[in-house]
Each structure stands twice: as C-alpha cells, then as structure tokens.
Image (tube, helix red, strand yellow):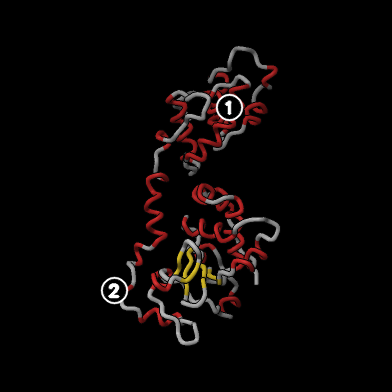
Amino acid sequence: MARSRNIKPALFLNDDLAERNCPLGRLLFIGLWTLADYKGELEWRAGKIKAQLLPYDECDIKQLAINLDKSGFIRFYSDGDKVLLNIPNFEKHQNPHKNEKAGGSDIPPYTETMRQAIDLTTLTINRDLSGLIPEQDGTAPADSLLLIPDSLIPDPSKDIRTAEADAAKPERAKAAKDLDYSKWPSMPSDQVMKDWITLRKDKKMRVTQTVVDQFADQLKLASQAGFTVDECLALAIKKGWAGFEYEWMVNARASPSKRTSKPHSFEDQNYQPGVL
C-alpha cells in the first residue's frame, strides 16, 4: 500500500542523482519512498512496482533500479527467499506516523550480509556468491544467514556498491578547471571563470561535466546572437544565476535585433571581475 511521504526540494537539485540516473529513474526513486515501510524497505516485485509507479511509461524498470543501486540511492538485498530493497537514510528524512511503526513490518531489516545474496546484474538471488542454502521447502529464513561461517562472507565494507562508488570517485571529484569545455563557443577570461565557479560553490552546486555541457547549448545560442561567453557569465554572476538560459540574457538585456555592434562592457552590468 502506498503511503504519503515528505519529499524535500533539495532532492531535485542532487547532482549525483541527476548525473547517473535518467528522468524516469529519478521518478522511480521518488515513488519508492511511497511504497517503502517505516524503515525504508520493501519487497522488490518489478511488475507490481512498474504498475504502481510508472504505469504510463515504456521502460525497463529493472535497469532503472539497477542504476539507482549502482549510484548508491537504493540497496538490494535478500533474506534468501525474496529480493528486497532498502533506501539509505530513509529514517533520517522521514517521520512515519506512530501507528505505522506500531503495526510493524514483514520486511526483514537490511544488513550487509544479506546484500551479498543479490546478483546486481540480474536482481536475482545468487546463492553461489552468498553461500545461502535453501531449506527443504525452498526457503531460507533470514536467521539462517547468521550461521554462515565468517570465512564464506565477503568483507561487507567492500561490497559491490562500495567498489563501484570507489571506482567512480576520480571522475566525480574532478576539479571544475579540468573539465571538458570544448563545446563552449570560447573560454571566458580567467577571472570571470573563477568568479562563476565561486558563485556555484557558494550556492552549493558543483560544476560537473553535465553542467558544463548544459551551459554549452545555451552559450552557443547566445554566441549566435552576438553575446560573448564573458558577457553571459558576467551577467549570470551579477544576477546570481546558478544556471543559464539564452532567453534570460535577452530578457535581462536588449533583444539581439536591437543591439548595436558594440558589445556591452562589464562596467555596464555593474560587475567587476574578481568582485562578487
């Protein structure tokens, strides 16, 4: 049964979520919060969840979920019988009604050991990897996981999700100055570039390759209308724009058809490089 949950505005500005998950994947992530129990956990039943959260969209919900797991926003695990799903930090951001907690949950809580039972490429129970042995009736209660010898349990601190996250860290940590700006019409002056990066840093919005590429499309439109990259970023700094769209430039200043051949100076914009 779906439940009402609190979704915070900051979720829509999460760079990591946006960079590594498509719009439908991000919508699925939000929807999973409404299906999870008070601990942030639920049984993974792809067909049912697809019907509940994305009934009008043609998509591979399993692949969307795998991407969310790879990027660390959900975690799959198993009790040896069912494939289960955990939303990290769910209890940090949600305050379920006391009656919901009092009613309890049939979903066993997530543990690192139980995560080893999942093959993340197919979202199936991988008994060869985990060491799980089903009972005579085909089930393996969660308590049986505690009986697995330590020598057969992979180091929980180095599970699949952690390994993939570690491998991705160099790319996510790349400095703004080292990103690829080849799609931009031209590079801005050093000081304007520094001021723009500082502006986004002050707003707690990192400069990533995705951001750079999004700016490129709008800067090209502005360039075709006669605006320079320095002018665009300078006006963005003056206005406090973390993002940028060509239309904003037109609305904030003169229409391209009315502009003279002489470009506006930074002094005209009341902006001085190096002074935010």
Task: Identify residue type, mark 1.
Answer: Lys
Residue 205 position within the rendered picture, expressed as x and y whole percent measured from the top left: 49, 43
**Foreground residue, 20 or 197?**
20
* Residue found at the very far top of the displayed protein: 261
Q: Which numbered disc covers residue 191?
A: none
Question: Residue 164 lies in what quarter of the image?
Answer: bottom left
Q: Earlier in the sequence, mark 2 or mark 1?
A: 2
- Using residue 245 as the reference point, say whether residue 108 is left or right of it: left
Q: Which residue is mark 2?
A: 151
Q: Give the class, few, some or many, for how many residues have Cα within 10 Å of label 2's Cα (few <14, many ≥20).
A: few
- Name the element at disc 2: helix
Look at the picture and state if 250 lies above or below 141: above
Q: Quadrant of the N terminus?
A: bottom right
The residue under the point 55% across, 58% down is 63
Can residue 199 be seen here? The reply is yes
Q: Amino acid at mark 2?
A: Ser
- Judge the density around disc 1: few (<14), some (14-19), many (≥20) Cα neighbours within 10 Å: some
Q: Residue furthest bottom?
A: 136
* Residue labelled with disc 1: 220
